[in-house]
Amino acid sequence: MRTIIIAVFLLLAVSLYPVPAIQLSGFSFLGGYYYPEREDKEISYFDRQDIRFGITGLRSKPLVFEISLNYAEELLRDRLGLYSLFLVYQTADTWSGSFQIVDIGYGKPSEPFSRDLTDPEYDRYRLGNYRFQGIRFDHSLSSQFQASYRIGGNSHNTSIGTATLSFLLDPVTLDIFYLYTGRDNNLNKTMHSGGTELLVKSRCIQLRHAQSWQHLSSTFTTSNYISYGELLWQITEGLQAGSELFYAEQLRGYRNWRELSFLTAYSWRKLMNTVQYSRTETGNLKTARVTGIVTCSLSDSLSVGLNTGIHIPQVGDNYYSFGLQVKFNEKFPL
């Protein structure tokens, strides 16, 4: 059924719209891990391929259409799937309705904290990451207040509903949100969640903070609190420093979770050196990691980098990661 829907949208795009641009982006990592304490398998292989191809800017009033496909390598197979789809209907500046297939969530890290492609959270929302298929309605109440609503779901979370009220006054953006899912990501329980998301962005300072209170209920009831904060400081034109903190109380219903990291990034001409220290506490278990990434910008849309890391577990010897990562993002007007 999903394939038929995608095919219908593509046929509509080709027949009804001019095609102004093709968007191509990708994140690729090739490397491995070195475990000194292993006598029979000191080196293990690891790679990640995440390539996206899309059509953007398809407009024929009152409709706007965008679609993006995603190619990714999994453990035993390669997979090409739908990454996002937007079909927007808008006849006035104050409201719009759309059908969407997209990932949604809260607490998305900024680009400097997403440079390590070996991190499984590099491209995910920290306060819940949900696959959404359904209808979205946006309404501009004034120049400073906007409201949005979603209703839909997916095969795992079953039903999903959201309501968000946004306040915008430069340089501050504040969202107050409510999220409902028929099944939580980790436990087979209905979840009600509410929280706030804040962004303060000036020339030198960028502050992000998102927090959520989650209430899960079925045969038994549990509640938890999740928070993600990030501070990034532009010290000079070529030097950045920042920190981020993730805290979850009763995460997955049974333990607390804390992550703290510090980052510095120095750029000189086409080179950039990023160093990040991260520490994770899960209950009584503590781990740490130091990551260094040296990247070279070959153009405005393409960069290659050498990725190295030292992993410090609480139990056992340190182990190391190394590899080459490539990022590109290009738009081709037609």
Image (cartoon, helix red, strand yellow):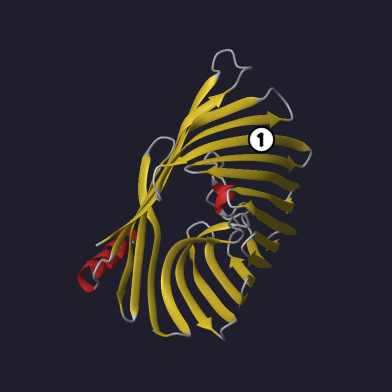
Q: Residue at x 61, y 68 (%)?
A: 179
Res. 273 visible in picture: yes
Q: Quadrant of residue 282?
A: top right
Q: Residue at x 69, y 56 (%)?
A: 229
Label 1 element class: strand
Percent of width and height locating residue 325 = 46, 37
Percent of width and height locating residue 161 = 55, 70
For this view, does 8 lie left or right of residue 183? left
- Residue 137, above or below 101: below
Q: Specify the farthest residue to the right.
A: 284
For this view, does 247 lie left or right of residue 82? right
Residue that mark 1 sits on: 289
Q: Residue at x 61, y 36 (%)?
A: 291
- Residue 309 or 312: which is nearer the viewer? 309
Q: Residue at x 45, y 73 (%)?
A: 135
Q: Specify the farthest residue to the left.
A: 15
- Residue 160, above or below 42: below
Q: Specify the farthest residue to the top.
A: 39
**Quadrant holding the N terminus:** bottom left
For this view, does 5 lie left or right of residue 270? left
Percent of width and height locating residue 261 = 69, 45
Percent of width and height locating residue 165 = 61, 77
Q: Amino acid at mark 1?
A: Arg
- Residue 128 or 331: which is nearer the viewer? 331
Callout 1 crowding tier (Cα within 10 Å): few <14, some 14–19, many ≥20: some
